[in-house]
Amino acid sequence: MSDGVPDTFEVTIVPLDGPGLRVVQVPYGERVLLDFHRRGIADVPIGCRGGGCGVCRVKVSSGSYYTKKMSRKHISPSDEEHGIVLACRLIPLSDLTIQPAPVETNERADATPTNKETPSWQ
Amino acid sequence: MAMNGVLRPGIIQIRVLDLEEGLAHYRDRLGLDYVSTGDDGRVYLKGYDEFDRHSVVLREADEAGMDFFAFKVLDDATLTELTGKLEQYGVAVDHVAAGEQPEVGRRVGFTIPSGHRIELYAEAGLSDMGPIVENPTVWRTEPRGMAVRRFDHALLYGPDIDKVTDLFCNVLGFKVAEDATLGPGAVAVWLTCSNKAHDIAFVPNPEPGRFHHVAFFLETVNEMMHAGDVMVHYDIPIDLGPTRHGITRGHTIYFFDPSGNRNEVFAGGYTYYPDNPTRHWTPEQIGTGIFYYERELNEAFLSVYT
């Protein structure tokens, strides 16, 4: 772009388990998960795409960004301070590094209660 | 008049993260008619083929999901009678004064074992935008967007569905049109208080009070294909469909509102009568029961809800 803002930002996904980083060029202004979905990248689970269901919870370990409103059921104010967001609401303002952060992996004492327990019959 | 007691789904109050986006979705895309905005900011909407003043209420909140599902009952005496039955059964009821929602009479509310708030009410003002009653043409103004006709049902997720079923059937007079055994001790139910194949449904889930979807009625599969065209044109995320449910036999598309609440457009479904036996689904066939042509559940069916 002529004003110096890049057309894309580099988003590096650190897998929760398993080898290898994936690097994706996300267009300026685009929500990270929606771009992944269009490209068929499934490293971050996709759910409601509206900040409501919480399945696409990720931790941003580097970079700057902003988010559209996210359900407090899944992202607490403390989560936000720790860079934990929903990828469907995440819009990069620089290159980012992210890692999936499903609630059950959350080490914090005040973690949002999970609603993703495996039902007993599964 | 065979139908009495609890008549039908009447009002659903849905939490949205952004009211403006929610209103645009439910009014312009689904095609509900805007009725009013309350002093507290709640937005009231109705389907073009509904007589009562409103059926869908949007409330801006920090979490998505459902505040409550309210059934309309035959009359005020029925409301009093059902309240007594609920209390006798051991349910703690509370009372919402008439006018808490515009032109809606007194409401009786209670929390069911799955963690959801259910309400009953008998009176609601008639809409001046309802179906025409004298030499009626099929609509007052040509419908917008997906052209949904009315609020149809909801599917809710929570624990203790056996207790929920007992309450709905033995206190409120519902029938189990279908049930599906998902695994040991886990039975999902499709309950009806009318001629519809379901008016409310429950799937067992460890966490109480969760909202799987609210469904809106379309008459035909052609209308459903048009709704799908609207979804694609406006980039509305589709969860699954168009397809059919084996359970209820209705045709369906699941999609999401801008706050992540799942919506459904639902067409058809068989006619239920209270003397019909319950239809059962076994664990091996549950995929076909939920998504008839795919014959398997998608990942989101069990894990994505608000």
Image: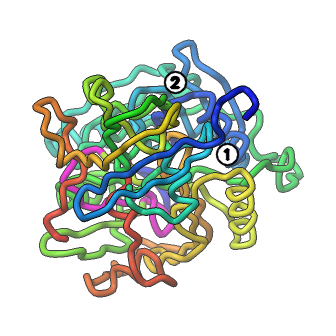
- Amino acid marked by disc 1: Gly
The answer to whether one can see residue B77 in this image is no
Q: Which quarter shows the C terminus of chain B? A: top left
What residue did someone put label 1 on? B47
| Dominant secondary structure (helix, strand or loop) of the stretch shown in magenta | loop
Above/below status of A43 relative to B83: below
Judging from the image, what secondary structure is the residue with disc 1 in? loop
Q: Nearer the viewer, residue B164 or A26?
A: A26
Image location (x, y in percent) of residue B212: 40, 53
Above/below status of B7 relative to B76: below
Image location (x, y in percent) of residue B142: 86, 49
Q: Which quarter shows the N terminus of chain B? A: bottom right
Crowd rating for badge 2 (residues with CA inside 10 Å; few <14, some 14–19, many 20+): some
Coloration mode: rainbow
Q: Chain of mark 1?
A: B
- The residue under the point 17% across, 47% down is A105
Magenta stretch, residue numbers: B193-209
**Separation of disc 2 and disc 1 at Cα?**
17 Å
The numbered mark, 2 or 1, whose residue comes first in the sequence reads: 1
Magenta segment includes B106: no
- Mark 2 and 1 residues: CB-CB less than 8 Å, in contact? no
Query: Does residue B225 appear left or right of residue B287 in this picture?
Result: right
Judging from the image, what secondary structure is the residue with disc 2 in? loop
Image location (x, y in percent) of residue B24: 68, 36
- The residue under the point 24% across, 76% down is B181
